[in-house]
């Protein structure tokens, strides 16, 4: 039976480190770090994320300011707000919540954020620094996953890592961070031939594709470490029956509520093959916000 890697517990440890860092600034007479969160439109999932970010900021003593813009905001107004936040000496970090409504150019907005305030680590300057292995603001989810692996003593040097997914936000930066730690990294994706066979080579499998239950137990090398970045809502009873076949309790919850959250990995099956696995929920999800607040403190400390 695999060890369950508790993301919530590790997020709590990371947040405590940030809280102490904020206190240390205050002890030196410096102001609290300031994070500006820009939310355009009324996407319900984004509203939940933004609320969770504000609550986490309050917990560690970071000042968070929300800027809510209407669904029909022109790009020029968003550009103007980013320019003002870039110039605001009380703001250390700027986060533009994604996805942006149709008609707004997310890349243009992200590229406009000052690299020094880019706490998401999505600006090409920060991505370039990561590519070169230099310090900078790094994407929150992969850097928090690296912190989780380090905490659990996963020795990355020389191991075979497969990153499933090639997004700018998780897959690509995760692969670079693993490479920096001397893992042998393969990036696999939807067009990879014989995906199960590629995954079976992995001593460390990181799944970040957003496909519920894609990774079956038979795709996992016995003893592998599995990090599941996916957070998917399943509503199809047929799919739920397959994904949760080894998790009777989860299937019961699904049947009573008509929906359930699951990762890209079939957790119940992974538990029987892997040596360690992150759950969904309670795995990588809580780590992302902890990574964001760590970045905000880093941006404030320059
Ligand atoms: N939407 C969902 N996750 C994220 C994230 O990590 N950063 C931003 N900016 N938007 C998101």
Image: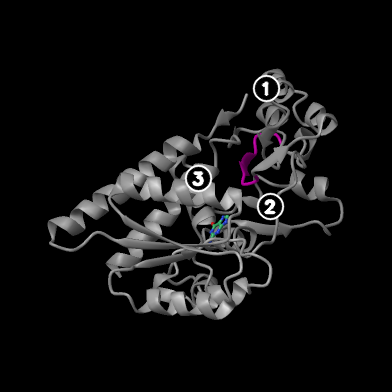
Q: Residues within 10 Å of mark 3 (few under 14, many from 20)?
A: some
User: Could you tell me residue 22's position as x and y percent?
Assistant: 25, 54
Q: Earlier in the sequence, mark 3 or mark 1?
A: 3
Residue 73 part of the magenta segment: no
Residue shown at the point (82%, 33%) measured from the top left: 239
Residue 70 shows in this picture? yes
Residue 255 appears left or right of 277: right
Q: Indicate the secondary structure of the residue bearing disc 1.
A: helix
Give the number of the disc on residue 253: 1
Ligand 1 found in image quarter: bottom right
Q: Residues within 10 Å of mark 1 (few under 14, many from 20)?
A: few
User: Could you tell me residue 264's position as x and y percent?
Assistant: 70, 43
- Residue placed most toward the observer, 283 or 38: 38
Residue 124 shows in this picture? no
**Residue 70 against residue 50 in the figure, above or below:** below
Q: Quadrant of the C terminus?
A: bottom left
| Dominant secondary structure, magenta | loop
- Residue placed most toward the observer, 268 or 259: 259
Residue 190 appears left or right of 35: right
The Cα atoms of the two marked residues, 3 and 1, are separated by 30 Å
- Residue placed most toward the observer, 83 or 287: 83
The Cα atoms of the two marked residues, 2 and 1, are separated by 31 Å
Q: Which span of residues is magenta-colored?
A: 221-230
**Residue 95 against residue 286 in the figure, above or below:** below
Residue 230 appears left or right of 57: right
Give the number of the disc on residue 149: 3
Q: Nearer the viewer, mark 3 or mark 1?
A: 1
The Cα atoms of the two marked residues, 2 and 3, are separated by 15 Å
**Would you say the beta carbon of the disc 2 residue lies within 8 angstroms of ligand 1?**
no
Report which residue position mark 2 lands on: 162
Residue shown at the point (39%, 66%) measured from the top left: 93
**Residue 21 against residue 233 in the figure, above or below:** below
């Amino acid at each position: 039976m695999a060890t369950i890697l508790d993301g919530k517990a590790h997020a709590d440890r990371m947040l405590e480190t940030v809280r102490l860092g904020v206190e240390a600034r205050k002890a030196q007479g410096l102001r609290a770090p300031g994070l500006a969160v820009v939310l355009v439109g009324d996407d319900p999932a984004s509203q939940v994320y933004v609320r969770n970010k504000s609550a986490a900021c309050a917990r560690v003593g970071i000042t968070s300011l929300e800027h809510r813009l209407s669904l029909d905001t022109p790009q020029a107004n968003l550009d103007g707000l980013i320019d003002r936040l870039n110039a605001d000496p009380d703001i250390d970090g700027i986060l533009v919540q994604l996805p942006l409504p149709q008609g707004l150019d997310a890349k243009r907005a992200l590229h406009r954020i000052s690299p020094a305030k880019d706490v998401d680590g999505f600006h090409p300057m920060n991505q370039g620094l990561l590519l070169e292995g230099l310090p900078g603001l790094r994407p929150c989810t992969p850097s928090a996953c690296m912190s989780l692996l380090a905490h659990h003593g996963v020795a990355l040097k020389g191991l075979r890592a497969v990153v499933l997914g090639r997004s700018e936000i998780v897959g690509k930066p995760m692969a670079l961070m693993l490479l920096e730690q001397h893992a042998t990294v393969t990036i696999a994706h939807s067009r990879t031939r014989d995906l199960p066979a590629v995954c079976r080579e992995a001593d460390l499998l990181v799944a970040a594709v957003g496909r519920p239950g894609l990774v079956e137990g038979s795709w996992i090398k016995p003893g592998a470490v599995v990090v599941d970045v996916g957070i998917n809502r399943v509503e199809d009873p047929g799919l739920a029956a397959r994904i949760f076949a080894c998790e009777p309790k989860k299937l019961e919850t699904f049947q009573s509520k008509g929906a359930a959250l699951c990762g890209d990995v079939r957790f119940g099956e992974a538990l029987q093959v892997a040596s360690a696995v992150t759950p969904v929920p309670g795995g990588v999800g809580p780590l992302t916000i902890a990574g964001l607040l760590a970045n905000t403190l880093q941006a404030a400390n320059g």
